[in-house]
Structure formats: C-alpha cells, structure tokens
Image: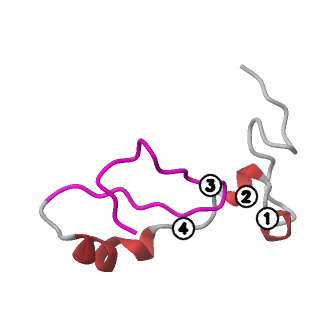
Amino acid sequence: MPVDGLATVTIGDLDRVLFSYGPETPEEALAKYWGLVTDQACIPSELCRARIPADEPPETCSGRGACTR
C-alpha cells in the first residue's frame, strides 16, 4: 500500500516495508525491489522461533542473548 508519509502509519512487528524514493513509480519500485525485502526481522525479535537455525548464535539484546553496552 503506497503512502505519502509515515506519521499515521503503524508498522507492526512482522510487517514488511519497502522505503523507496527516486524516479520510479510505486509499481516500478515494487517490481524492482520487493523481492529484496525479507521477512527475517522475526528472527532477532524471536517472533518466529521455529525458523531460527539450531546453530545460530543469539542476537545481541534478543530473548536468547544478553544485552550489553
């Protein structure tokens, strides 16, 4: 869904978002770039634990990793 601004848009935990600016139309940008937008954000947030490989080290500040600064 193309929007002109983000002030009133709620982006959820598992939403996929494509930010595009430039000469392409929204349709051209979707066709060209949407395939590059992954759904892997659920891995560090641990909202899709079944998709986390067993040998994957914990992400910093995730549910499995200690948060250090």
Figure quadrant of residue 56? bottom right
- For the residues marked 2 and 3, what is the alpha-carbon distance in whole angstroms? 15 Å
Is label 2 or label 3 in front?
A: 3
Mark 2: secondary structure: helix
In depth, the one of 29 and 58 nearer the eye is 29
In depth, the one of 30 and 50 nearer the eye is 30
- For the residues marked 4 and 1, what is the alpha-carbon distance in whole angstroms? 14 Å
Given the image, on which type of amino acid does mark 1 rest? Answer: Cys
Given the image, on which type of amino acid does mark 3 rest? Answer: Gly
* Residue at 27% across, 71% down: 29
Q: First in sequence: mark 2 or mark 3?
A: 3
Is label 1 or label 3 in front?
A: 3
Question: Can you tell which mark lies on residue 48?
Answer: 1
- For the residues marked 2 and 4, what is the alpha-carbon distance in whole angstroms? 11 Å
Question: Can you tell which mark lies on residue 43?
Answer: 2
Counting labels gives: 4
Q: Which residues are magenta?
A: 1-22
- For the residues marked 3 and 4, what is the alpha-carbon distance in whole angstroms? 15 Å
- For the residues marked 1 and 3, what is the alpha-carbon distance in whole angstroms? 14 Å
Task: Residue under label 3, please give it.
Answer: 12
Q: Could you say where residue 32 lies in the image, as x and y percent from the top left?
A: 29, 76
Image quadrant where one finds the N terminus: bottom left
Q: Please say if the residues under marks 3 and 4 sit with CB atoms less than 8 Å apart.
A: no
Question: Can you tell which mark lies on residue 7?
Answer: none
